[in-house]
Structures are given as structure tokens and as C-alpha cells.
Image (cartoon, grey):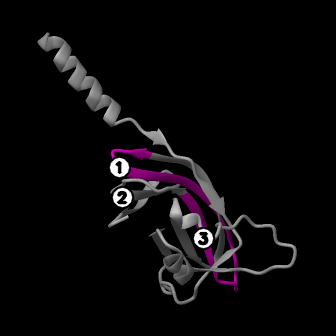
């Protein structure tokens, strides 16, 4: 009987440490506010309401633009994660995976950059995940952990 109990505890511990894939959606058609951390080469944020989002991002209006944007009521059920790279290179992102393990969201993405001699860019990766009880978000860029943010009161 005690062997089965110990085996059960071990299985519970193993299952608690497995990663769960999270559904996510990416968004574009936004610019980064020049008032949000303007001197940082990179920024990372977790946003849980529209007011916070609007302090960081604005809508880029372009004729004929069909960019996927957040629904007006998105923050009722969604949490927004964003990574921003600034500098004299245009950066694009490709999300590899979004998982949760032990209350920590792990966002894995790859970046590619095209350098510019004169223009300066602020390039965002913006995505949403379902809200839930989580303690932190880790941003893994090009297979390297670049930032861990605690989620407070979310």
C-alpha cells in the first residue's frame, strides 16, 4: 500500500511540472508610444486592461489596413504580453510556443532584424493569452531567457 502511495505522489509531482500549451493570438497595426520607456533598447510588459494597453500602444491608421487588432472587450478574458525592440533595425518576430508550467508562462519567439543606416524603429510583438492564475511570464528570445516579469494582482 505504501509503495502505491509513494508512486502516486511521484506521478502527481511529475504531472505538476509538465508544460501546458496555451492558446494565443498575435496582433499588429499598433505603434509604440514614444512616451513609453523611450530610451530602453528593449521593453517587456504584461497588460491586463485597456488603459494600460493604451499607455503603451496606439493604433497605426493605414488605408486598407486589415491588421488583426484586439477586440474592445478583450481584457475581460485575455492578458496581453508584449516585447518591444528599439534601435536602428527593423525587427520581426515569430512565436515558437506559449506554454505554462507551474504557474509561469513561457513565451518562446525568434527574431530577425534588418539594419537601417538612418531610421530608428520601435518594433512590438503583441499577443494575448487567456487570463488565469499565474505568477510570472518569461520571455525567451532566440532560445535565451531575456526577461522574467512577476504578475501582480492579475
Say whether residue 93 is visible: no
* Among the two numbered marks 2 and 3 on one chain, the one whose residue lies closer to the N terminus: 3
Decide: is 129 above or below 33.
Answer: above
Q: Residue furthest right?
A: 64
Q: Mark 2 and mark 3: span between their CA atoms? A: 20 Å
For the residues labelled 1 and 2, say whether their Cβ atoms are less than 8 Å apart.
Answer: yes
Q: Is residue 50 magenta?
A: no
Q: Which mark is residue 136?
A: 2
Residue at 70% across, 82% down:
117
Identify the image quadrant of the N terminus. top left
Q: Are marks 2 and 3 in contact (CB under 8 Å)?
A: no
**Residues at circles 1 and 3 in contact by the CB criterion of under 8 Å:** no
Residue 51 % position (x, y): 51, 80
Query: What separation in Å lies between label 1 and label 3 (alpha carbons)?
Result: 25 Å
Magenta span: predominant SS is: strand
Identify the residue at image location x=17%, y=18%.
Answer: 5
Q: Position of residue 84 (x, y in %)?
A: 55, 72
Element at label 2: strand
Q: Secondary structure at mark 3?
A: strand
Magenta residue span:
100-128
Q: Is residue 11 above or below residue 124?
A: above
Camera-side residue: 9 or 125? 9
* Mark 1 closeness class: few <14, some 14–19, many ≥20 residues within 10 Å: some
- How many numbered markers are drawn? 3
Disc marking residue 103:
1
Placement of 35 over or under 78, stated as above or below: below
Q: Residue under label 3, please give it.
A: 124
Amino acid at each position: 500500500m505504501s509503495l502505491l502511495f509513494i508512486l502516486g505522489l511521484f506521478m502527481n509531482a511529475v504531472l505538476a511540472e509538465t508544460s501546458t500549451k496555451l492558446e494565443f493570438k498575435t496582433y499588429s497595426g499598433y505603434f509604440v508610444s514614444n512616451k513609453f520607456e523611450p530610451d530602453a533598447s528593449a521593453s517587456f510588459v504584461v497588460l491586463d486592461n485597456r488603459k494600460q494597453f493604451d499607455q503603451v500602444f496606439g493604433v497605426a491608421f493605414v488605408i486598407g489596413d486589415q491588421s488583426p487588432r484586439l477586440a474592445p472587450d478583450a481584457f475581460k478574458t485575455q492578458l496581453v504580453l508584449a516585447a518591444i525592440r528599439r534601435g536602428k533595425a527593423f525587427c520581426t518576430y515569430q512565436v515558437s510556443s506559449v506554454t505554462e508550467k507551474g504557474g509561469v508562462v513561457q513565451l518562446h519567439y525568434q527574431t530577425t532584424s534588418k539594419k537601417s543606416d538612418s531610421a530608428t524603429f520601435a518594433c512590438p510583438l503583441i499577443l494575448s493569452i487567456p487570463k488565469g492564475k499565474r505568477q510570472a511570464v518569461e520571455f525567451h528570445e532566440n532560445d535565451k531567457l531575456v526577461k522574467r516579469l512577476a504578475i501582480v494582482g492579475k
